[in-house]
């Protein structure tokens, strides 16, 4: 009876394993769709969005498969199958993602190369046009002939003379004022110098007087001392 029970249990486990394998193969076939070649940037962007959504779905299905496997008899085998299926699906999605990103990079390089080529063609065409029809040189104002001065009227000459006279008078007045200012400043400096010399002389005289007084006091003290010594000598 126990042997029969074990055989039945093993049979049910094998049946569950075969069902899991069949589901794995069918799901793998469903995800193994051929990668469509991207032709436009819009298609590449759409493919990347699809890859993002499909990757999230694969991860969600793998999480559900793990829960199912833990409830089965052959847990490790079931988990290995689920991991292999997840790896296959993610590899396919990665291939699509690589193809879309490669197309976008290639397209960006091609657009940049076309822009550079168009710019080079425009520059070459402009240089050829300039070489064929060079622009006319602009006239130099210095090369123009000086206009012949018109003969001045007597009133104009008189007005100009008066203006020159007034200008000269103003300049002379300004120079005279400057000279007067310089003279005043020189007098002030001279007076300040005399005052400074006077103060120096007064201080020197005061020092000489103090030295003379000190010398006289010293001489008087010496004379008094000598007289005092003389008186003592006479008293003896």
Image (tube, rainbow, N blue to C red):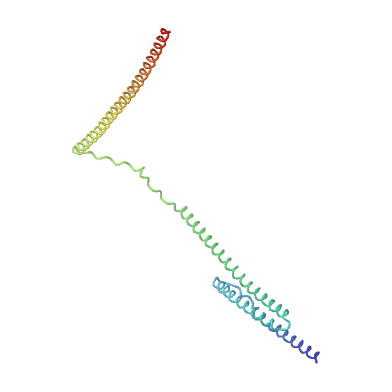
Q: Position of residue 29 (x, y in %)?
A: 67, 81
Q: Position of residue 164 (x, y in %)?
A: 23, 35
Q: In the image shown, does 187 or 90 lie closer to the viewer?
A: 187
Q: How many marks?
A: 0
Q: In the image shown, does 34 or 215 lie closer to the viewer?
A: 215
- The relative height of residue 72 versus residue 163 in the rendered view (above or below) is below
Q: Is residue 18 left or right of residue 157?
A: right
Q: Position of residue 203 (x, y in %)?
A: 34, 23
Q: Residue furthest bottom?
A: 1
When asked about the image quadrant of residue 13, the answer is bottom right
**In the rendered image, which quarter contains the C terminus?**
top left
Q: Is residue 139 left or right of residue 6?
A: left
Q: Position of residue 45 (x, y in %)?
A: 55, 72
- The relative height of residue 55 versus residue 132 in the rendered view (above or below) is below
When asked about the image quadrant of residue 96, the answer is bottom right
**In the rendered image, which quarter contains the N terminus?**
bottom right
- The relative height of residue 49 versus residue 233 in the rendered view (above or below) is below
Residue displayed at 58% across by 76% down:
53
Q: Is residue 101 left or right of residue 166?
A: right
């Amino acid at each position: 009876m126990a042997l029969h029970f074990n055989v039945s249990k093993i049979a049910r486990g094998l049946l569950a394993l075969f069902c899991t394998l069949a589901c794995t193969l069918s799901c793998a076939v469903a995800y193994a769709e051929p990668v469509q070649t991207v032709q436009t940037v819009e298609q590449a962007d759409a493919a990347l969005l699809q890859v993002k959504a499909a990757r999230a779905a694969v991860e969600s299905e793998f999480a559900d498969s793990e829960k199912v496997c833990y409830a089965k008899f052959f847990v490790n085998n079931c988990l290995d199958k689920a991991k292999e299926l997840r790896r296959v699906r993610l590899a396919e999605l990665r291939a699509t993602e690589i193809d879309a990103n490669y197309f976008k990079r290639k397209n960006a390089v091609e657009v940049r190369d076309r822009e550079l080529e168009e710019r080079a063609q425009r520059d070459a065409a402009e240089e050829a046009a300039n070489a064929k029809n060079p622009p006319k040189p602009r006239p130099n104002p210095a090369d123009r002939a000086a206009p012949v001065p018109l003969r001045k009227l007597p009133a104009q000459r008189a007005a100009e003379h008066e203006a020159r006279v007034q200008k000269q008078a103003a300049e002379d007045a300004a120079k005279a004022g400057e000279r007067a200012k310089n003279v005043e400043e020189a007098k002030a400096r001279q007076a300040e110098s005399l005052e400074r010399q006077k103060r120096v002389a007064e201080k020197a005289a005061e020092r000489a007087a103090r030295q003379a007084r000190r010398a006289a006091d010293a001489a008087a003290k010496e004379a008094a001392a000598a007289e005092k010594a003389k008186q003592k000598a006479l008293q003896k």
